[in-house]
Amino acid sequence: MLAEPLNLSRLIPDDGRPVEWVTAPAPVPYPEAVAEMEARVAAIAAGEAGERVWLIEHPPLYTAGVSARPTDLIAPDRFPVFQTGRGGQFTYHGPGQRVAYVMLDLNRRGRDVRAYVRGLEQWIIGALGRFGVEADVRDGRVGVWVERKGPGWSREDKIAAIGVKVRRWTTFHGISLNVEPDLDHFGGIVPCGIREHGVTSLVDLGVLATLDEADAALKASFIEVFGPVV
């Protein structure tokens, strides 16, 4: 459970300016995505561009955050591996997973990184709730989790990852939501350094959602947490 209530008023600016909402029409190679993010973040920080949320897919790949441990890369030759400046450890990106790169100006949103991360969590939880999926966060475990139960058993699986970086109070990197990725592809790493739990997706949970439907849920929930988009 969240340790304290999320203060939405800190995250929604008073000026009403909408966030640009962009969806890439085809998978984007990781180096191109990072270069585009870097350029946009620099422009936002300089006051030359507005905020943006960029929804994309990647080809299959692994990324290593600043806390990644080499021993958590189980199959280094399976997919390309990219070092990245975001927080966190190893994660997988690939087809069927919605990656959202979030480039917001925290000067407009309270200059509170902790509240911002809580906002990302609430955004994902709200989007999943639109599919009837109950999700939450866990102390000591980054990301968003679902509890799965059956006769005599229960477990918790991760359905969404969060990895962020903030420069000059401008955010980049963001979230990844598993809609219908090949879950076997996560087997080449220890996702986020957590060995005791698995990963899941909307389709794995029996929710036959498309990426377009996931995008619509993400947009509606984002507006609730962070304000209007265009």
Image (cartoon, helix red, strand yellow):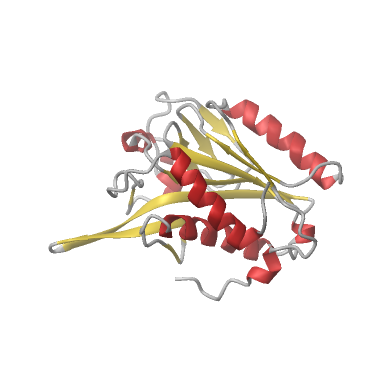
Q: Hey, which quadrant is residue 210 in on the image?
A: top left
Q: How many marks?
A: 0
Where residue 37 sits: x, y (%)?
69, 37
Q: Is residue 190 above or below residue 5?
A: above
Q: Residue at x 57, y 43 (%)?
A: 100
**Does 89 sit left or right of 112 as displayed?**
left
Taking the image as shown, residue 8 lies to the left or right of residue 57, namely right
- The extreme bottom residue here reads 4
- Give residue 184's quadrant in the image: top left
Q: Is residue 142 in view from this perspective?
A: no
| Residue for point 50% across, 44% down | 215
Residue 223 appears at what percent x and percent y? 61, 57
Residue 107 located left or right of residue 145: right
**Residue located at (45% from left, 50% from top):** 160
Q: Quadrant of the N terminus?
A: bottom left
- Tell me residue 70's x, y (percent): 47, 38
Give the vertical position of 8 relative to 220 (above or below).
Answer: below
Is residue 66 something one can see in this rendering? Answer: yes
Can you give x and y, in whole percent of width and height, for residue 211 in the image? Answer: 45, 39
Which of the two residues, 88 or 106, is positioned nearer the viewer here?
Answer: 106
Q: Is residue 53 or residue 75 the one in the foreground?
A: 53
Q: In the image, what residue occupies the spot 70% across and 68% down?
A: 10
Q: Nearer the viewer, residue 222 or 27?
A: 222
